[in-house]
Structures are given as structure tokens and as C-alpha cells.
Amino acid sequence: MQLTRKRIITLMLTLLLGMTLIACKNETTTTTEVAPGDLLIPQLTSPDAVFFSYEDFDITYRDLYNGVKVNDGLNQLLAMVDLDLLNDYYQSVTQEEIDVKKQKLMYGTNDQDIIDKFTEDKLEEYSLRFEESMYLMGYDDNIDDYVRLVVMRENYVKDIITDEASSDQTWYVGPSQIADYYQNTFRPDVKSIKIKFISEADAKAVMREFNLVSRAGDLMLYTGEKPLDQVPSSQLNAENTRSLTEEEILGYYIDMYNYVYQDFRSLIDKNMDVLDLLELEDLSVAYDDLKTANQSLANFVYYTLGNREDFLSGESDELYYTYAPVKYFSNRDTSYYMILNLQGFEKADVDGFEGEEADLVALIGQEKYDEIEKEMIDTNLSSESFVRRRIAELRNEHDFLIYDYYLSVDYSAVDQNYAEDEEGSLTVLASYDDKTITPDDLLEYALNQNASLYLIYASQIKAIKNAHFEDVYCQNTNQCVYDFRDNESAKMLEHINDFESLKEQFMNSMYADFYEFEDYLYLAYGVKTEEEMINNYYVKATLQPLYIFDMIKENDYEVLSTILELMQPYFDNYFSLNVRHLLIYLDRNEDGSPDDFEDFYSDLEDKASFDEKLSSFEENIREYLNANTDNSFTTLVNEYKAAKRNDETWGEFKRYGFFIMTENLSSSASLTYSSSVNKFEDSFVDGLIDLYQSYILDDFKDESYLYSETLIETTYGMHLIRAEKGKDFERPTAVFEMTFDEDEEPEFTLGLESDAEIINLEQLKIYAQYRFSVISFGTINLSELHGFTRPTIPASLTKAFDAYIASLHDALYVVGFLNSGIISQIQAGELVNEVSNYCNLTEEQLSVKMIRLNEIYLRQMFADLDLR
């Protein structure tokens, strides 16, 4: 593959800077007539016609087109091409396929069991986020159209994966590939008596219960008269031990299994025929499940350890059981095991298979053939890049070419085999087969898809500059100069210096050896010239906070009333605690992770017995912790781990399968409501809230630590929480009485006085002014433009603002709130649409869309902050 200059640019940015640079593009650019290398850029036929008019500026089709290109123009272009190239798949897509894909896009899974576990609130949130994302992409009443294209692309890729014409590709799935997968990857279940122990001491204690010892590389029976637990291993010999018969070995393994699992699995009848043993579900071991917890253990069971059936038949002389506890530690599994394989896995020998599908089906069965084929296809499709590359190859087969230099650079990141056009065009944007797409075609397609959003994007920089450019860049001048080259304001000179510094850093970097600075600007910032960088990046970043503060001040700071409402749970649920917790959990499937407690409990037939067992366990734990000041969660875990299964205190709980672990949740910082509410499950956060509320009572406020009154249930299990006072344990208050200096002048900004614990609107107004002054520091003269100087706030109130309101307030300084302001301006403007061929949007449709878009932006601003 020949690497052109643009190819090197794209590859270097992908590998060295990361694709996030492309995502950092600004939202509007201005098309230049000539691109790097004097390439021609295709132009609209009516770029300067007016689409929308404001009181002080207009939005032209050029503005819209630039917004389309820099935001998702490539995606829109590719959708136009793919809908045509994949037209044969359009009608064949079923509604069921659309619904299944829509479910996957909405919930991230098609596993109904997982979806059924989502709460109603979670289901509603997932559904709402999906619908909103579709609306923002322009699919409001036609979501199925978007999903259909996704399915069309995948169905095409599915077909070529199994098409014999693709047999020379590494991703081809045919009979030989399926046979290879079956031979090397597919593993039927092994039938095994697998016994899991917390520790080696635990395993040996169980062995001693049945007078079993490990000696001379074998499992033996102790026959001496002295109790085994009083006999050192050095005194075990041929006189006091004997070998076991094959039947005795099986019998004792059943004894140990029943002893360990007696409280939560069905007991195995020692008199049961071996063939009946093989039918027991509890004795089936699946490789993939075992591998999830412990790859080494899975390999040991499947490939190292023999099996009893082959040993007794003489087919193998490999040992089929462990004569001593074995450990194969992994990150999720630090247990010991005793294992006896009853039967190994059996499957057809298809090594080197090169026949037809029917021949392989005859060997492995149609069901297994279809299962493996689907799994291999799904594995390929699980990678978005795989589907993207296959569709790119399809476009290449149809001579797809983009004539716009910058869109071509973008596409090079999608298709690394793309051969760029080196000449350009003034009229054609892209071509394939004998068809062409013009800039007019792309703009028409994009505007009819999502004109309202492109109007917002195109209006941003103009609205922001119109509002405050003169205030920042034309202070103390008789005439405002808008050309950055002639504007001598301090802020503009700062921008120019910043740009020169950026360029110097680039020229001294390794990237300068591979691509031009102008290309770097485009891929990193979405701009093509110094002028665009100054205006669309530096100027916009400077003026945007001023525009947003104007919105905050509207109607006497009306938006802050919403902030106060959202603040209430931060105040009501405040806590600051140093937390360590003890988790009581179960691992009945032995995958090394806590079982889903809700599922476990709902499946219990005798919930009363479990509740009684858990209550007794909790009582013993609390008695242990209260018995000695040196006793802690850590010493408890160690003692429990070392305890025997017949231990008077802990034995019954170990036999039942209870595990415990502890964790310090405040190793880096105290837990607070705001840092916990989106991190831990609601029930756990509620437990912390309750614990704090108890801690501040007179009865407990002097305690050095406090335990939760009850166990807290989460999906992981049951938690006992131990809390100490956090860094800011005492809840911050908004109560403030003004203090005065020796000249009787107030030491802080007037209006902050309050006798209420919670922040009020007047205090929040002053805080909003303070935060704005910090965000826009050095940009403007606050007293001249906004009528105030930077507020002075006492430390006690600063602490309250930080605890309850800071994150909520600063959420206003985001693009979503900016867009809400732009929408307000649009609703006061006029839809001109001078070239109606570009767009069929009506005033009424635009108004409806703007109302809905505003709702989405405002909701998403606080979606993760409106916590209770």
C-alpha cells in the first residue's frame, strides 16, 4: 500500500495522538477556496443565500454546509452511498431484526435475563437516552430508518463472511474454519467431582474428617489408632496408612463432596451407579465457565488430569484425581481444590478437515455446526471496526472517491486502504460507479435529516460574537475591528501568541516530520486556517462563558431556582465518612465472583431458614467485633478463612457456603454523598446516609467509629459498614452573619447573610457571580459590563457551596446550556430558506423541533446530577 501524505497524517494521528483529536473538532468552520496542495474543494451552487435570519446576522447555506461537514458530514455522505449500494438488502430486513437491534442499541444487550434485572427507573433512563440520541441525530419519527441501515450493513457482512468468494480472507467462515474451531476451541462438559476449599488448611481438615492423607504421591487411608490430627506428617508411613481401591477413592470423594456441600447442594448417593453419576448436573464442569474464574485450573481439569472412565478401561494410565489439595491462583480465585474427573470430554476428530458442509454436519451434527457458525459470525460482528472495514471494502469495489480534501482526510481514518483523490473538483463531492454526489446533494440530504441541529451549530459562533465581541476585543476604541490581524486588543494579541506557541510546539515535535501544520489543525481542532483557529477556537472559548452568564442572569437568575431544587438531596443526604465494609456473599457457581444476591434469594425455596442462618452469622460477627478492640474486619476475615468446617463459631456458616471479604472504601478520600451516589448502589448509599444520621446524634457523636445497625443488601450480598468521621464530618451550613472591619465596613459581599442552614437564592446569585468571575478571569471588566466586582465569600459559605451546589452550578457552563440559549434566539428569528430545494422545513416544524431539542439539552445537563 502506497502511503500518501494524507495517509501518513491519518495514521500518525490515529496511532500517536488518538482518534479523540478528531472528536475535539469545533462545531463550525469556514470553507476556504483552496486546500493544502492547491487542491480544489467542491462548492455549493448557492452558498451565500440566506437560510435563517436574526436581527443582527444571517445564517447562510455555506454556514450550514460547513457545520454539516465538520460535525457528521462524513457519516451523512456514507449513509447516502451505503443505502444505494446495499439497496438489495433494504426490503429483506424484517421488523423483528430491527426490534432486536434496537434493543441492543438501547440496553447494550439482547440478553433478556440481564434486561429483566434492570429497575423500572433504569429501563426508563436507557429508553429515554436512546430516543434522545436518535432525535439529536435527526431520527425523531423514523428511528427504524436508522436501525434498518445498521442491520443492512450487518446483514451484508454476514453474507460475505460465509460466501465462498471470501475463502481467502482470514475472517471467512466455512466448513474448514468451523471444523478448526470445533477441534481447537469447542469443549464439551467434563464430568467431575470438583470440591472447592477456602484454603489448604480447610482442605486438609476435611480430608482428616475421613482419615485421608496425601503420601508418596497418592491418596491414602490412615489406619493408625492415634487420632490423625495428633499425628505429624513425618510419622505417616507404610505401617499406619494403606492404599485405596478405585471404588474407595470414588467413595471418599463423594464423602468429601457431601461434607462440603451438604447445606446447599443435593447429596450424592454413594451407592449410585456411575452412569447415574454422569447425569448429575452438579457434576458437569463447563470449560468456559471455569476459565472465566481460573484459566490455569480449567486447563488442569481438561488437559492435565486424566479421567476415571479411561483409566479403568485401560485407554489411559494418567492419574484422574488429585491426591492432595491443588491451587491454581488467579486474580479472581485463590482457592484450593480436590478434583476427580469421572469422564473426559468426547468429540469427533475433525483435525485437518477439508470437506463440504454436509460432511462436517455428519460428523458433528447440524445443531453444533449452526451454533459454531453463529458464534464465529457474531464474534466478527461484535467489533464495529470489522463491519466498518467490510463496508469500506464494498465501497472500494465500486470505486468510491471523495473530492473534498478534508472529508477525504476524515475518511482515511475509516478506511486505511482508501486511495485519495489528488486533483479535487469544484462541482462533485464524491463518486462511485457511474454516480456522483454534489455538495448540494449532501446538504439537501443532511438538512432534510436534521436541519434544526445544523442551524444551532451554525449559529453558535455568530451569536456569541454578536453578543460580546466588542466588549472583549474592542474596549477603549472608537471603532471595533473584527479582522484578527488588525485587532490590537490585549486578548486578541494573547490569542495570536497562543497560536504561535502552538505552531512552535508542533514544529519542534515529531509530528512535523510526517504532516503539515494545517492538516494538524484540521484533524485536531476542525479548523483549516489561522483565522478559523483564532475565531472558532480561541475567541469562542473566551466569549462562551459571557454568553452563558447572560443566560444565567435572565429573569433575575431564574435558572438558579432549578439549581436550588436539584440541590435539596445534596443537603438532605449529606455525609462525610471514612468507610470500610464487610461483605457477606455466596459463590454457588464457583466462578470466583459474588453471585447476584437478588437472584439467589428469589430462587430460595426456604427463605426463612436462610434469614435465620444469616441473622445468626451477623450476630456472631458483631459479637466477635465487640469482644476486643483489636478485632477488626481484617482479623475476622483471616480467622474465618482459617476456621475448620466443624468450628464451633464459624463452621456452620462455612458449610453453608458463606464467604466474607473486606475493603477500605476511603483509601484515597472520605466518602461523601456526591462522590458516592453515582458510584454505589442506592441501598448502599442509603445505608451511609442512615449511618451518618445516627452518628451525629448526641448518643453517638463522640464515638470513634460506628457500625451500621443492620446489614445492607446489594446485588453483591450483605454489607456491614464501619464508619469513622470523614474529613468534613460536620455538615456545612449556609448560616452567616456579616462581620465588619475596624472602619465598620462589611468584610464580605452584602447579601450573603442568612440564618438558614440551606443555601438560599440570594446567596446563590452571589456565588454565580463569583464563579463567573473566576471562569472569565481577565476577560472583561466586571464592574463596567455586569455592574459588580468579584464577590468576597467567607470560608464557611465556600465549604457549603462546594458541598451542595458547585457541580450543579458549573453544569450550566456546558455546550448543552449554550445550545439552549441559541434555541431561544432561533425562536425569535425568521426562517427564510431562500433555496427551498435544499430543505423542506417549515416554520412550524422548526418550532416543534427546537422545543424538543431544548428539553433534551436541559434534561441531559442535569441527568447525572439530579440524583434522588
Image: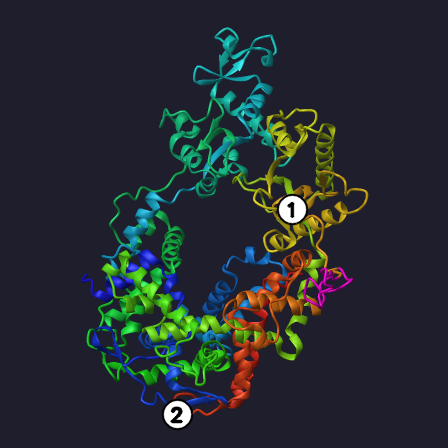
Element assignment for label 2:
loop
Question: Which residue does the numbered mark 1 point to in the structure image?
Answer: 727
* Main SS category, magenta section: loop
Amino acid type assigned to the residue bearing label 1 in the image? Lys
The image quadrant that residue 503 belongs to is bottom left
- Front residue of this view, candidates 530 and 393: 530
Of badges 2 and 1, the one in the foreground is 1
Residue 683, image x, y percentages? 67, 51
**Residue located farthest toward the front when viewing the structure as drawn:** 743
**Residue sticking out furthest to the top:** 239
Q: What residue type is labelled 2?
A: Val
* Above/below status of 761 relative to 849: above
> Residue 230 location, x and y as percent?
60, 11
Q: Give the colour scheme shown.
A: rainbow
> Toward the viewer: 165 or 325?
325
Q: Across the whole image, how many numbered discs are drawn on residues? A: 2
Give the image quarter of residue 231: top right
Q: Return the disc, 2 or 1, that comes first in the chain's sequence.
A: 1
| C-alpha distance separating marks 2 and 1 | 63 Å
| Residue 746 within the magenta-colored segment of the rendering | yes
Q: In the image, which residues are magenta? A: 738-760
Q: Does the magenta stretch include residue 8?
A: no
Percent from the top left, x then y, of residue 664?
A: 60, 40
Identify the mark at residue 835; answer none if there is no mark.
2
Residue positioned 60% across, 74% down in the render: 552
| Element class at badge 1 | loop
Q: Is residue 94 visible?
A: no
